[in-house]
Amino acid sequence: MPDTPNKLSFASVSLHWLVGIAMILLLAVGIYMENTETYALYPIHKSFGVLILLLVLPRIFVRIKNGWPTPLAGRQAAEIMLSRVVQWVLILSTVLMPVSGMMMSGFGGHGVSVFGLELVAGNYDPVLEKVVPINGDLAGMAHSAHGILGNVLIVALLLHIAGALKSRFIAKDGTVLRMLGKEV
Ligand code: HEM
């Protein structure tokens, strides 16, 4: 069923919340594991980080098919523009975060696997007794992109949540209810 200005489809609503919650958890785990050097979390972060693409790709397909939800009446043009920019940053980051993560790990020689299922082999050198990057420059660029995008994503998420709170409690329009699957 397609989205209408008054009611969003089950696919739009469910994929929005599933991807949103998964992204927030991956962000939190990524920051925690890197800052505390909790290496046991790395394979879990990487596995779920790859698996999220199984939700992200259908979500993007649904968005392309349905377009962005129509802004409800009473919104100012500048506000609509800002929320659109934030929505673009969020949706692009759902692709760029997993891709940069996979490039960092793959080119870095660490390999990419999903709960033990190897997608890209690691590059451990038994003579040197260490992981050797396949392409250190690309791995480094992907690493920087993963970190910078993570920070951009946090700002975009905060703006997105602030916008939702403003709609709900200040403008008191139906934007949030519509995102919960209700007819407005
Ligand atoms: C939506 C998916 C993902 C999100 C939101 C995400 C988020 C993050 C964040 C916020 C960090 C901390 C960065 C920093 O503090 O500089 C991080 C670190 C990391 N991520 Fe991801 N990530 C995702 C997917 C992936 C994937 C698919 C992989 C690899 C297959 C991956 C591998 C890593 C690694 C190895 C680190 C630690 C880097 C280090 O120790 O220097 N991530 N991630």
Image (tube, rainbow, N blue to C red):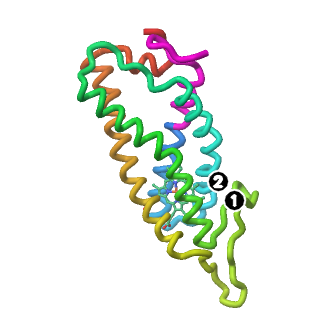
Residue 52 position (above or below residue 6): below
Residue 36 visible somewhere in the drawing = no
Q: x, y percentage for residue 93?
A: 47, 46
Residue 177 appears in the picture as rendered: yes
**Residue at (59, 69) in percent of width and height:** 107
Q: In the drawing, does residue 87 fall left or right of residue 99?
A: left
Residue lying at the far bottom of the rendered structure:
127
* The image quarter in which residue 76 lies: top left
The one of 71 and 51 positioned closer to us in this rendering: 71
Cβ at disc 2 under 8 Å from ligand 1 = yes
Residue stretch in magenta: 1-19
Q: Secondary structure at mark 1?
A: strand
Q: In the picture shown, does residue 16 fall above or below 155?
A: above
How many numbered marks are there?
A: 2
What kind of residue is marked 1? Ser
Residue on which the image places disc 2: 47
Residue 1 in the figure: left or right of residue 158: right
**Residue 35 x/y as whole percent:** 43, 64
Which residue is nearer to you in this view: 112 or 134? 134
Mark 2: which secondary structure? helix
* Residue shown at 47% from the left, 40% from the top: 91
Residue 113 is marked as 1
Crowding around mark 1 (Cα neighbors within 10 Å: few <14, some 14 to 19, many 20+) is: many
Left-right relation of 163 to 92? left
